[in-house]
Image (cartoon, rainbow, N blue to C red):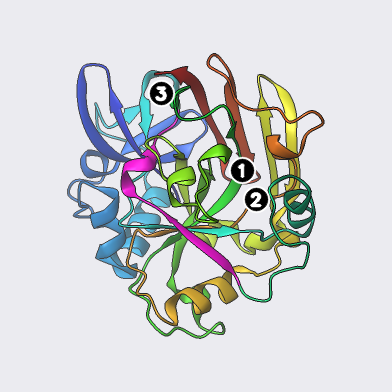
Amino acid sequence: MRLCTFSIDADPRPRLGAFVDESTVVDLVTGLSGLVDVPPTMIDFINAGSVLHDAVREALASTTAWSEGATFDPAAIRLHAPLRPGKVVGVGLNYVEHVEESSRTLDTAKELPDRPVLFSKPGTAIVGPDQPIRHNAALTQQLDWECELAVVMGRTALEVSADDAMDYVFGYSIVNDISARDQRRSGQWFYSKGQDSFAPFGPVIVTADEIGDPHTLQLRLTVNGDQRQNGNSRHMLFRIPVLIADITAGMTLEPGDVIATGSPQGVGAAMDPPTFLQPGDVVECSIERIGTLRNPVVAV
């Protein structure tokens, strides 16, 4: 399933939707009324569990005619962030070439990490597709980008083994891990990466069954149409089962929580000369089989 949270101009109320094809989004609550009792929000849908998910998947596959007012042209809707996670766990230095470029330009270690490098972003950093990334010139002149595969948790996970970890994944999306490189403080990344709008998220959540192996996906990022990043999730140092096992060794991951699994090479700080986001820029993150997350950069 390709799930989204959306609204329409005539009614700004967020709705839970699914893309049934490239030209049709169905309001799941309205469209499946009488067939499946669907909760109205993405987080409630995730929490409802696999029995409901399977029923919705089957109904979407078998329904050939939708009631009036249940379907929408994707061009006529506004996509929102799929949900506001309870927490976003970021993974730093998780691609070999990014470790190398970071050691040259961001004062990080040259050696590959022997354990995942973790940081957090608050829920207030989340914005959806086409929402602005804030550029506050009083705080940063080094606003940078990172296209990352987002893992969306589907079950409460604590002390989960790597062998069992993928059973806890609901689906996948995209996070643009925005960083104010000049706001790192004594090696701490939270303020650099956690400011409002520094976690664009979306445009959809694709359920795990449709992705299959998440370690085969091409990731690309452009700024104003110019390619800056082009990598593949096969080059992760620590793959998703290892990340989940490491995080949940001491921290509970809950349904709807997001793991941003790290950035391939090609960040602005590593360009020659270093190049950073400016007001008026448009950033697009694309991940194979998920879609494209587009956000403008706006002065505040």
Between discs 1 and 2, the one toward the N terminus: 1
Question: Looking at the image, do the residues carrying marks 3 and 2 touch, with CB atoms under 8 Å apart?
Answer: no
Q: Would residue 254 be found to the left or right of residue 171 on screen?
A: left
Q: CA distance from mark 3 to mark 1?
A: 27 Å
Q: Which residue is mark 3?
A: 73
- 57 is within the stretch colored magenta: no
The amino acid type found where label 3 is placed reads Asp
Q: Quadrant of the C terminus?
A: top left
Residue count near mark 1 (Cα–Cα under 10 Å), binned few <14, some 14–19, many ≥20: many
Residue count near mark 3 (Cα–Cα under 10 Å), binned few <14, some 14–19, many ≥20: few
In the rendered image, residue 203, in percent from the top left (x then y), is placed at 46, 37
Which residue is at the far right?
A: 272
Residue count near mark 2 (Cα–Cα under 10 Å), binned few <14, some 14–19, many ≥20: many
- 123 is within the stretch colored magenta: yes
Span highlighted in magenta in the image: 116-129
Label of residue 263 in the image: 2
The amino acid type found where label 2 is placed reads Ser
Q: Would residue 153 be found to the left or right of residue 124 on screen?
A: right
Question: Looking at the image, do the residues carrying marks 3 and 1 touch, with CB atoms under 8 Å apart?
Answer: no
Q: Would residue 23 be found to the left or right of residue 8 on screen?
A: right
In the rendered image, residue 226, in percent from the top left (x then y), is placed at 74, 23
Question: Looking at the image, do the residues carrying marks 1 and 2 touch, with CB atoms under 8 Å apart?
Answer: yes
The amino acid type found where label 1 is placed reads Cys
Which residue is at the far front?
A: 186
Residue under the image location 72 percent in, 58 percent down: 95
Note whether residue 92 is visible. Answer: yes
In the rendered image, residue 119, in percent from the top left (x then y), is placed at 48, 59
Q: Which residue is mark 1?
A: 147
